[in-house]
Image: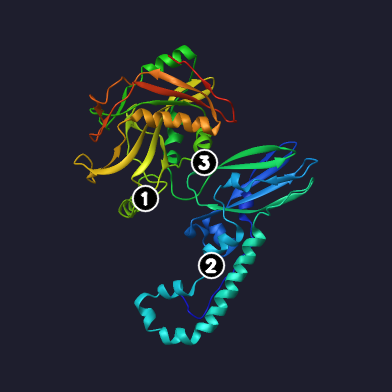
């Protein structure tokens, strides 16, 4: 039972278990180290469960090896980062919350609460002041880093799952130096953590020349199917060329990964459906290609779970210029409707103009500056608005019959429009 008369705030800022798994990058300008604290580590070090408040602690160390001053761009790590005082405020103790934890029994303790209230108010205030100081002490100092010196501390960011891409950018001598890290987080499992490792291990990759690659892409099935392969689904309207880590890095700032289907993720999906709240990592239903469900999915969320863009990708046994080739399907969810074709009697309704979602991905990568090149290739088969095809749940769609073929880049680059056909 939570005590009304005792309040313990015992952070341990000297503990640093995360240092055993830091990642480093170094060049002539700087040496960068990062680590992302687990939920348990954050609770031990900062004294409160950050994860329960939707926060994540990213530890960063910057050693300036140049002859000029530099400065960390905090918004590059997390555009919606929290200041130390703001993060502490989210985690502050509250007498009201502690009273509500007793429920109905709290009314019987009301006389004791009234007597103890002045002491409790004092204890809560002291604990919150101590929390403010602890968070401030451990946060990354937002100031210039002089030549030959080192700055380190925690950046407080919104909580993420799956594989998190951390971009560290330094303003240095009228230039911006960027360093990219990819960290697999401890927490709810996302789909690629279960599917990609066995798939990659079981396939021997073939490096194809351009003519052979285009021939194989044209010969792909026009649509996905159900599990038995007897019914056609959404069009296979995308191919992406690039390493998995590059894909995650390219899409990460704007797209979220997908939780596997568990009781917990189903419950979170159900709550989001009822309340209309955002659920960034909602599981994605399986579509089938190559006789298997997608290897992983990404989603661009909007205001609610009912409106989002779903991108499903399947790995192939092909390489082009040493880079893996992925085949995908993308559609835009614009609402929810009832259907007899699913076990839960509901399904997302897709925008019938499926080419718009396909072209949105290309525009999104153009904007990010990480698209090496893109173009279109026949293969889906055209159908009109007046004579549409239908997916597995009966939604109509029309298309010009092309699939987009995109090459992503590890570095920012100027894109080219390729004539694949």
Q: For marks 2 and 1, give the one nearer the viewer.
A: 2
45 vs 93: above or below: above
Decide: marks 2, 1 in contact (CB < 8 A)?
Answer: no
Residue drawn at x 27%, y 32% as measured from the top left: 226
Left or right of 245? Residue 1 is left
Quadrant placement of the C terminus? top left
Instruction: Compare marks 1 and 3 and give the one earlier in the sequence.
Output: 3
Q: Is residue 65 left or right of residue 299?
A: right
Residue at which label 1 appears: 265
- Mark 2: few/some/many CA within 10 Å (<14, 14-19, 20+): some
| 166 in relation to 159, above or below | above
Q: Is 379 on the left-hand or right-hand side of 116?
A: left
Q: Locate residue 317, reporting x and y percent.
A: 44, 23
Q: Mark 3 and mark 1 in contact (Cβ < 8 Å)?
A: no
Q: How is the image coloured?
A: rainbow
Q: How would you rate the neighbour count of disc 1 (Cα within 10 Å): few for under 14, some for 14-19, many for 20 or more?
A: some
Tag of residue 253:
3
From the viewer's perspective, tell me whether residue 265 is left or right of residue 52: left
Q: Position of residue 391 (x, y in %)?
A: 26, 31
Dot 2 or dot 1: first in sequence order is 2
Question: Is there a contact, CB below 8 Å, between mark 2 and mark 3?
Answer: no
Residues 241 and 280: in front is 280
Kind of element beneath mark 1: helix
- The residue carrying mark 2 is 92
Sequence-wise, the earlier of marks 2 and 3 is 2
Q: Quadrant of the N terminus?
A: bottom left
- 248 or 11: which is nearer to us? 248
How far apart are the alpha carbons under marks 2 and 3? 29 Å
Q: Measuring 63% from the left and 47% from the top, which residue is drawn there? A: 34
- Where residue 35 sits: x, y (%)? 60, 48
Label annotation for residue 378? none
């Amino acid at each position: 039972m939570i005590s009304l008369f005792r309040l313990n705030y015992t952070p341990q800022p000297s503990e640093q278990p995360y240092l055993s798994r830091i990642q480093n990058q170094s060049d002539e300008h700087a040496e960068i180290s990062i680590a992302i604290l687990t939920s348990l580590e954050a609770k031990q070090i900062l004294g409160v469960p950050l994860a329960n408040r939707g926060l994540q602690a990213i530890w960063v160390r910057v050693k300036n090896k140049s002859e000029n001053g530099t400065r960390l761009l905090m918004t590059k790590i997390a555009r919606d980062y929290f200041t130390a005082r703001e993060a502490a405020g989210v985690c502050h103790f509250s007498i009201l919350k502690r009273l509500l934890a007793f429920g109905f029994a709290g009314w019987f303790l009301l006389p004791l609460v009234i007597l103890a209230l002045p002491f409790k108010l004092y204890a809560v205030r002291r604990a919150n002041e101590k929390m403010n100081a602890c968070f401030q002490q451990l946060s990354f100092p937002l100031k210039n880093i002089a030549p030959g010196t080192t700055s380190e501390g925690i950046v407080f960011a919104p909580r993420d799952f799956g594989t998190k891409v951390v971009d560290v950018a330094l303003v240095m001598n009228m230039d911006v130096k960027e360093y990219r890290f990819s960290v697999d987080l401890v927490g709810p499992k996302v789909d690629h953590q279960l599917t990609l490792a066995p798939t990659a291990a079981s396939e021997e990759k073939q490096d194809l020349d351009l003519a052979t690659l285009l021939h194989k892409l044209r010969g792909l099935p026009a649509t996905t199917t159900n599990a038995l392969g007897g019914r056609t689904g959404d069009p296979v309207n995308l191919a992406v060329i690039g390493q998995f880590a590059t894909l995650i890095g390219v899409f990460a700032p704007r797209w979220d990964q997908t939780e596997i289907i568990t009781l917990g993720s189903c419950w979170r999906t159900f709550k989001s459906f009822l309340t209309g709240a955002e659920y960034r990592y909602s599981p994605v239903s399986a579509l089938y290609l190559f006789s298997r469900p997608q290897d992983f999915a990404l989603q661009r969320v909007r205001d609610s779970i009912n409106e989002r863009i779903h991108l499903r990708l399947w790995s192939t046994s092909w390489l082009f210029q040493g880079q893996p080739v992925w085949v995908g399907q993308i559609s835009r969810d614009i609402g929810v409707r009832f259907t007899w074709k699913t076990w839960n009697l509901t399904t997302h309704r897709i925008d019938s103009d499926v080419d718009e979602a396909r072209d949105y991905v290309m525009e999104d990568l153009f904007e990010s500056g990480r698209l090496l090149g893109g173009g279109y290739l026949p293969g889906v088969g055209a159908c009109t608005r007046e004579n549409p095809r239908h997916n597995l749940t009966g939604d109509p769609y029309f298309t010009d019959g092309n699939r987009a073929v995109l090459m992503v880049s590890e570095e920012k680059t100027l894109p080219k429009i390729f004539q694949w056909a």
